[in-house]
Amino acid sequence: MPTLTLTSKRQATFPASLCEELNLNPRDLIEVEPAELSGERVRVLRPRKTPKRPWLGCLKQKTIVYESSMAAIRTSIVAGRTKDET
């Protein structure tokens, strides 16, 4: 039977076999549900996948990508100096 190890910070380490059996991956959420089995109080662990984040990367279309070669940087410096002189 797989056993969990609890650290001093109350963090649990799940054995690889249990993670495979429950189809758990890093950052997955686990719901702990109280239940009663044969008159005994138990806890049921249910994997809950992390929610999708549709907002992640949504600003990518609105970003401006500038060329960052040395030639482009030198051209930009010269343009800035010329602009300051006028």
Image: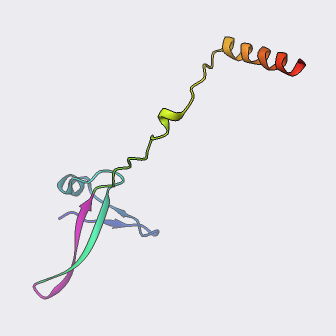
Residue 70 among magenta residues: no
Q: Residue at x 19, y 80 (%)?
A: 35
In this rendered view, identify the residue nearer to me: 63 or 18: 63
Residue 67 pos. (x, y %): 60, 19
Identity of the residue furthest to the top in this view: 71
Image quadrant assignment for residue 79:
top right
Q: Which residues are magenta?
A: 38-48
Identity of the residue furthest to the left in this view: 38
Position of residue 22 in the picture relative to residue 55 (left or right): left
Q: Residue at x 68, y 11 (%)?
A: 71
Residue 47 among magenta residues: yes
- The image shows residue 81, relative to residue 64, as above or below, that is above
Position of residue 75 in the picture relative to residue 36 (left or right): right
Identity of the residue furthest to the front in this view: 86
Residue 20 pos. (x, y %): 20, 52
Q: How is the image coloured?
A: rainbow
Q: Residue at x 89, y 18 (%)?
A: 86
Of the 4 image quadrants, the one containing the N terminus is bottom left
Residue 78 pos. (x, y %): 79, 14
In this rendered view, identify the residue nearer to me: 19 or 28: 28
Identity of the residue furthest to the bottom in this view: 39
In this rendered view, identify the residue nearer to me: 34 or 70: 70
Q: Residue at x 70, y 17 (%)?
A: 73
Magenta span dominant secondary structure: strand
